[in-house]
Image (cartoon, rainbow, N blue to C red):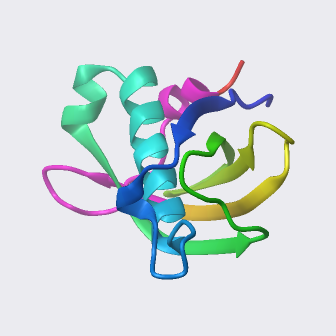
Amino acid sequence: MTPEIFTVDITVTQEVIDDRNHVNNLAYLQWCMEAATQHWQKRSTETMREQYIWYVLHHDVHYKAATFLGEQLQLKTWVSKNEGVRSERSFEISRIKDAKLIMHAKTTWCLLNTSTQKPIKITDEIRTLFEY
């Protein structure tokens, strides 16, 4: 499996700056969740989105450096593993001007049937959505 890497460019705005004048750690996680949703929206069909929903089970986040107002960042995300009802998605955020790694994370998701709200095994159709 070669995962498709989905990228999002981000400009740091005032809304995410904390009282230490750098990006609040929660903003990075929010950006990751938004990118995961965008990737799912881009690759899935309307029928899939009606039948399935993803819930987060676990976040593992590692912060490496601070970023500041006006900086340009690039977020990369990809699905790194699918097993049973669980999927692992990886994230990296880097500063564009010097390619400095700012944070990396992995999030474990569980696929649920929207009607029953119960876990459902990841289908081959969904598993291959995020591959080349």
Which residue: 68% across, 25% down? Answer: 131
Which residue: 74% across, 47% down? Answer: 94
Q: Residue furthest bottom?
A: 19
Q: Is residue 132 above or below residue 62?
A: above
In the shown orientation, is residue 39 left or right of residue 118?
right
In the shown orientation, is residue 36 left or right of residue 68?
left
Q: Nearer the viewer, residue 80 or 64?
A: 64
Which residue: 73% across, 60% down? Answer: 104
* Rendered image quadrant of residue 86: bottom right
Q: Nearer the viewer, residue 31 or 119?
A: 31
Q: Nearer the viewer, residue 44 or 10?
A: 10
Q: Nearer the viewer, residue 90 or 96?
A: 96
Q: Which residues are magenta?
A: 109-130
Residue 48 horizontal/vertical position (percent) = 30, 30
Which residue: 32% across, 20% down? Answer: 45
Q: Quadrant of the C terminus?
A: top right
In the shown orientation, is residue 18 left or right of residue 54?
right
Q: Is residue 74 magenta?
A: no
Residue 1 horizontal/vertical position (percent) = 79, 31
